[in-house]
Amino acid sequence: TQQFLRQTQLAAPDGQSRNPALAHILEVESDIVQAARGLSSNHEFRTLFPGGPFGSAVKTACQAIASKGGVAAVKLSLNGFDTHSNQAGTQERLLKDLSEGLVAMRSALIELDRWNSTLVTTYAEFGRRPRENQSNGTDHGTANAHFLLGGRVKGGLYGAAPRLDRLDGNGNLPFAVDFRSVYATVLE
């Protein structure tokens, strides 16, 4: 990138830009490259990571955690749960990707002796309504499930079971645990 920019009119011959915006972009790019070097890891995991985009993201995250750079938090995304139609097959595939990815992450973190000092949480922007719509899917809803995993997590189910006979006027489940209390517990 810098070689190309030196050949353009935007960059000065000595590599310093006369354009302040371009100079800032080059500085940010340099910072990113330097940070990436600190996060690179050649750790050879015994764990087999699943294929596909989410499996690759889990492997990359575990490589970053294995680095000497000191990663405090990692965010992974698994998109596609906004299923207003033909939900069954999509949900099955996505939940399989999620479960296989989390199993691999747990295995890799155990290898790194980091499972007991790690907390994995899931969240979503919105829940789904319990009633299927006319397109074999579900529409946006209010209540949702959250999963927390880690070596020090006390397992179990928390909150009341969903009451399908007590939907609100819009067909939504009332939530049993306010998500803010989940986040407060994590912070505590």
Image (spheres, grey):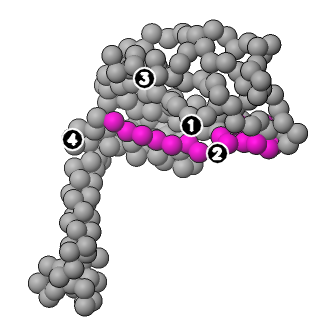
- Alpha-carbon distance for marks 1 and 3? 14 Å
- Alpha-carbon distance for marks 1 and 2? 12 Å
- Callout 2 secondary element: loop
Characterize the magenta stretch by its predominant secondary structure.
loop
Give me the disc on residue 80. Answer: 2
- Dot 1 or dot 4, earlier in sequence: 4
- Alpha-carbon distance for marks 2 and 4? 33 Å
Please identify the quarter of the rendering in which residue 137 is found: top right
Callout in the foreground (1, 4): 1
The residue to which callout 4 is attached is 68
The outermost residue toward the front is 169
When the figure is inspected, residue 79 is found, relative to residue 4, above or below; the finding is above
Whether residue 76 is in magenta: the answer is: yes
- Dot 3 or dot 4, earlier in sequence: 4
Q: Which residues are magenta?
A: 73-91
* Amino acid found under the numbered disc labelled 3: Tyr
The residue to which callout 3 is attached is 183
Is 17 situated left or right of 122 in this image?
A: left
